[in-house]
Image: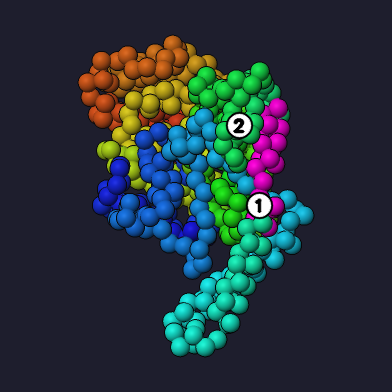
Amino acid sequence: MIKKITIRDVASYNSEGVVLDDLQKVNFIYGGNGTGKTTISRLLASKTPAEDYPTCWIEKHPYHEDTVVYNKDFRDKNFRENIPGVFTIGEEAVEALKDLEEQREKRVELARTIRNLEKNEQFVKTSVALADTRAEYEKTDNYIKETEERLGSVQPTIDSINQALEEMHITGFRIQPSGSHRHYYQIQREDGRPAFQTLSEGEVTIITFLYFMQLVKGFETNVVENKPRVVVIDDPISSLDSQVMYEVSDKIRDLIDEVRDMKDGEIGIEQIILLTHNKAFYRQLTDRQERKDTCYWWLIKKESVSRVKVFGHINPIRGEYATMWLELKDSYESGNYIVIPNLMRKIIETYFVGMGGMNKRRLIPDNFSSNAEEKAIIKSLAKWMDEGSHRVGDDLYVDDPGGMCEKYMKVFKKLFERLGHESHYRMMMGEEAKP
């Protein structure tokens, strides 16, 4: 299991870098586009991280485990005309797999014995032992190969992916065995024509994701092994409609439950790391209750540098309203001023108008003084509320985003103070209460 990730001096991470410490069985990393999520997934996917990312570190448990990563690189690599098969084993083959592992250990010992015998030239000349050992090695090797061929099959994966496509009501294409490559798949239309070059972006996403979900529990070759695994999933829902996104979320949720149910000492999927920018997708997967086996992080970018906020076992995104406040606070601290007025408008409409039943048109005029500067700022904010605009149309704001944002924030806070809701503002912004 991965316990700690350190990322420095790569992409949007500076020399100070970011540390994700005390990772648990289930880990959620939320962040907008460009905040550094893909860099994390690429580091974890690297087969030679010390060479590819010399300034980054991954701290694991002493034993070796496989890390299986779904990200854009995985989609690009595995979406092709002939897709490598995923070998899986049925439940009835578990005992046979144990025997197979014992035979592999025996093969290693026989190979070691052969090397020792070959080093002793005198022994070789005087003893039918080397020949016998070589014969035993050959017999064991053949048994292993035959068992691997019998146990490993790509057909269950074909059936599983096609069943998932049917459940999602995707009927335009299916997975079939490749006619020209053994143990490979091909994406075909219902009439048998190859569909590789005609799939939409959303279809490419779903087919590569379903393929990945098979690979999570299967193997790229028929040399099947029991090893602990870490699963990393980076934004799997791009270009998917809401129904398909729900189906994808459901499959990942099942995977999360499986990880949580793993007992100490069992071999299987022991850890999952999920990275996403989509709040709806995030909320479908996360728990409202605090769990000791789950940790949360939030990536933000300030002045083009990636930073991380650590939330430990507490889920920072528990609902749309709370998320608005969290995004407001992070946008203000990270200098992402362009979204702040719209977030303020939505918070005011949700809290004072939607929950409090106040008159939206009279809310601001009735609660502010005639101070000219303050009145101008409030008038601008009121215009946003009335028009429901999602763009910046104020020349003053565009000319001086940082300074104007400071003024917006002060007036926004004053509104809560004058209406007797200062404690709510401080709670949602994470400020300490006044003594």
Q: Which residue is mark 1?
A: 149
SS under mark 1: helix
Crowding at dot 1, Cα within 10 Å, few <14 / some 14-19 / many 20+, comes out as some
The numbered dot on residue 319 is none
User: Percent from the top left, x then y, of residue 184?
Assistant: 58, 38
Q: Which residue is mark 2?
A: 179
Q: Quick one: label 1 or label 2, which is nearer the N terminus?
A: 1
Question: Is residue 156 inside the magenta stretch?
Answer: yes
Q: Residue at x 63, y 62 (%)?
A: 142
Q: Give the amino acid type for the residue marked by disc 1 in the picture.
A: Glu
Residue 95's image quarter? bottom right
Q: Which residues are magenta?
A: 147-166
User: Percent from the top left, x then y, of residue 165?
Assistant: 67, 29
The one of 311 and 56 positioned closer to us in this rendering: 56
Q: Main secondary structure of the magenta part?
A: helix
Left or right: residue 193 compared with residue 99: left
Q: Residue at x 72, y 61 (%)?
A: 96
